[in-house]
Image: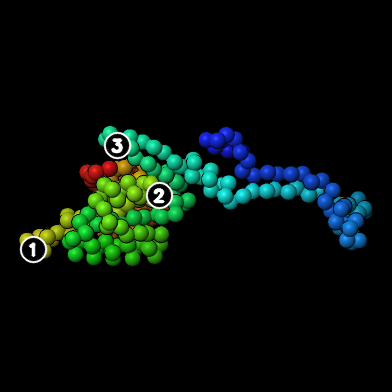
């Protein structure tokens, strides 16, 4: 059973049908449904244990268990704290500025690369803070942000640092990692390495939460 907001409800029922069902089938079909017990040298009608579980009930329990409403800087944050294996979207790649072609191109390239291993989306339809909240609401564990520091400024002949920001959904903490180690870092996280341990080996990044 699971304690939903509406009260306790069954997730899986387990019924001991004894030998009733098989005896009824045998009687109406005219066929024996026994097996021969070699040790006791006798025919036996097996007992039947009947489990009954529904995917819809389990899904509702996952949603209820993951749903949180929190206050962050005076505003409500809605978040689905799905376990990383249950989250329908694993990673969101987000460009800080969608009007900078080099940022957008880098973000699209990263999304394509990460999508080979994980369900990954790209979104540039709002400001970065709103994009983070949107991914929180659907339970995406990690956001990867490409910004000006990543690509530099070609107009000023400034090279980027080729690093991106990884944001953790639950803590809202951010770390900055080189692009060439991004998959390895995400791989550690999805394999169960705690965020705190992974983040300890990377530079912290300031962000909008």
Question: Between 122 and 32, which is closer to the camera in this rendering?
Answer: 122
- Locate the N terminus and report the quarter of the image it occupies: top right
Residue annotated with mark 2: 138
Q: Which residue is mark 1?
A: 155
Q: Nearer the viewer, residue 3 or 87?
A: 3
In the displayed image of the protein, which residue is found farthest to the front? Answer: 6
Residue 34 coordinates in the image, percent (x, y): 87, 56
Residue at (40, 49) in percent of width and height: 138
Question: Mark 3 vs mark 1: which is more N-terminal?
Answer: 3
Residues at marks 3 and 2, CA–CA distance in whole angstroms? 18 Å
Mark 1 or mark 2, which has the lower sequence index?
A: 2
Residue 92: mark: none
| Of the two numbered discs 3 and 1 in the rendering, the one whose residue sits closer to the viewer | 3
Q: Residue at x 84, y 53 (%)?
A: 22
Q: Secondary structure at mark 1?
A: helix
SS class, disc 3: strand
Neighbor class of circle 1 (other Cα within 10 Å; few <14, some 14-19, many 20+) is few
């Amino acid at each position: 059973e699971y304690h939903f907001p509406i009260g306790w409800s069954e997730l899986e029922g387990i019924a001991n049908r004894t030998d009733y069902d098989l005896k009824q089938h045998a009687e109406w079909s005219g066929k024996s449904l026994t097996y021969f017990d070699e040790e006791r040298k006798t025919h036996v009608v097996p007992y039947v244990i009947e489990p009954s579980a529904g995917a819809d009930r389990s899904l509702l329990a996952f949603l209820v268990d993951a749903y949180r409403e929190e206050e962050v800087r005076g505003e409500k944050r809605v978040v689905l704290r799905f376990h990383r294996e249950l989250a329908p979207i694993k990673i969101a790649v987000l460009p800080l500025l969608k009007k900078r072609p080099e940022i957008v191109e880098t973000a699209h390239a990263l999304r394509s690369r990460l999508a080979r291993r994980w369900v990954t989306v790209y979104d540039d339809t709002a400001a970065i803070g709103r994009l983070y909240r949107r991914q929180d609401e659907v339970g995406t564990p990690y956001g990867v942000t490409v910004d000006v520091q990543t690509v530099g400024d070609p107009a000023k002949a400034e090279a980027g640092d080729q690093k991106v920001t990884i944001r953790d959904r639950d803590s809202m903490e951010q770390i900055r990692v080189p692009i060439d180690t991004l998959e390895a870092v995400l791989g550690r996280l999805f394999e169960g390495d705690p965020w705190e341990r992974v983040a300890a080996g990377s530079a912290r990044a300031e962000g909008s939460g």
